[in-house]
Amino acid sequence: MTLLSIDDYRLAFDGFEGTAHVLDGITLDVARGETLGIVGETGCGKSVLARSLLRLNPAPPARVVSGTIRFEGENILAMPDAALRRLRGRRIAMVFQDPAAFLNPLLNIGTQMADVLHGQDSAGDAPRRSAREAHARSATLLASVGLPEPERLLDARPHQLSGGMRQRVLIAMALAGEPTLLVADEPTTALDVTVQAQILALIAALVAQRGLTLMLISHDLGVIAASCARVAAMYAGTVVEDAPTATLLATPRHPYTQGLLAALPDLDNPAHRPRGIPGSIPSLRNPPPGCRFHPRCAIATARCGVEKPALRALAPAHTVACHHA
Ligand SMILES: Nc1ncnc2c1ncn2[C@@H]1O[C@H](COP(=O)(O)OP(=O)(O)OP(=O)(O)O)[C@@H](O)[C@H]1O
C-alpha cells in the first residue's frame, strides 16, 4: 500500500539574484514498509526534498511551484498547522547529519528528551505526561537504540557523549512519537567509518523490529546499498532512475547513474580506475533546458536539449528518465 506519494513536485527558492529551480517535477511513490535510498551529488536537492516532507523549508524564500505530497492520502502541502504538528515526529520523523546541531549543549539529555515527549503530548492533544513518566520513557528509548546505562546518560550533557552516541540519542528522539516513516538525511556522514557502520546497522535493526518505512538520503551509494532495497538517483532536482538496489547496481540504465557507479572504487577489481563524471552540476538558477543532465551526457542528442524526458518503465519497478536509455 502506498504510504507516501509525491507527484510532479516543484520547489523554487526566490532570491535577489533570481529564482533557483531546485526541485523540478519529483514523482515518487513509497510503499509502507519499503526502504528507499535517495542518492545524488551534493546540491541535487536531496535535503530540500526530505525537508519538504515536513514542510521545513523556510517559505519564503521557498515557494511550491506545483505538485502534491500525499502521506496516507493527505496532501502535506495543504495541511493545516495543527495537523502538521501531529505529522512531525508522530507520523514522519527525521534524523539529520550533524547530531550536535540538534542538541542544546547546556541541557542534559533527559531534559531534552522530556521536551520532545511533552511537545508530542501537546501536538497530539494528549494529557501531558509527568516528569517521572517522561524519565522512564526516555530511558526505555535510549536502551532501544543500544545505549548502555540509559539512566546515567539522561543526566549527561551532549559534550560528554561521542558523535555516534549523540546520533543514537537523536534516533531515540525520532522514535519517541512512534513514527511510520523515518527519514534519515546523511545520518552517518559526520561519523568515522566504524561508527557509520554501527549506526547503519542500528537503523536497519529498528526498521525490521518496528516495521518502519525508511527514506535514507546519502551521496554515498555504498551506504544506500547496505541499507535499502530500492534506490532513486537524483540529478539537479529530478529523479533520473528508480529501481531495486540490486538492479540499479548491476544494470544502471541512466547515463548519470552509470557515471555514479563508474566513480566508485571496485574492491574486487583493483585494476578498475574510478572515473568521475565530466563537467559539473548545473546552476539551478539557470538550469539547462530539456534534460538537465544533457550537457554532461555522452549519448545526448538534439532532442535532449529541448525535451525533458519523463520517467518511463523499462521493467517492472525500474523507471528511467532518459530518451535514449
Ligand atoms: N533555504 C534555502 N534558500 C535558498 N536556497 C536553498 C535553501 N536550501 C537549499 N537551497 C538550495 O537548494 C539546492 C539543493 O540543496 P540540498 O541541500 O537539498 O542539496 P543536497 O543534495 O541535499 O546536498 P548536500 O548533500 O550537500 O546537502 C542547493 O542549490 C541549495 O543552495
Image: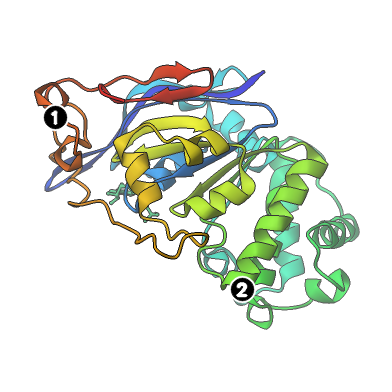
Question: From what the image shows, is residue 139 above or below residue 292?
Answer: below
Alpha carbon distance from label 1 to label 2: 43 Å
Q: Residue furthest bottom?
A: 160
For the point 86% across and 55% down, the residue is: 137
Q: Which residue is mark 1?
A: 289
For the point 87% across and 58% down, the residue is: 140
In screen coordinates, is 172 left or right of 249? Answer: right
In screen coordinates, is 166 left or right of 274? Answer: right
Give SS at disc 2. Answer: helix
For the point 57% across and 19% down, the residue is: 74
Residue type at numbered disc 2:
Gly
Return the x and y of residue 138 as percentages of the image width and height.
Answer: 82, 59
Q: Which residue is mark 2?
A: 163
Question: From what the image shows, is residue 188 above or below residue 317?
Answer: below
Estimate how packed mark 2 is, as few (under 14), some (14 to 19) or many (20 or more) residues with alpha carbons within 10 Å: some
Quadrant of image for the C terminus: top left
**Which of these two is toward me, 254 or 82?**
254
**Which of these two is toward me, 232 or 67?**
232
Mark closest to the chain's N terminus, 1 or 2: 2
Give SS at disc 1. Answer: loop
Q: Is residue 157 visible?
A: yes
Return the x and y of residue 81 as percentages of the image width and height.
Answer: 54, 32
The reply to whether the residue tagged 1 has its Cβ within 8 angstroms of ligand 1 is no
Return the x and y of residue 160 as percentages of the image width and height.
Answer: 68, 82
**Which of these two is toward me, 224 or 202?**
224
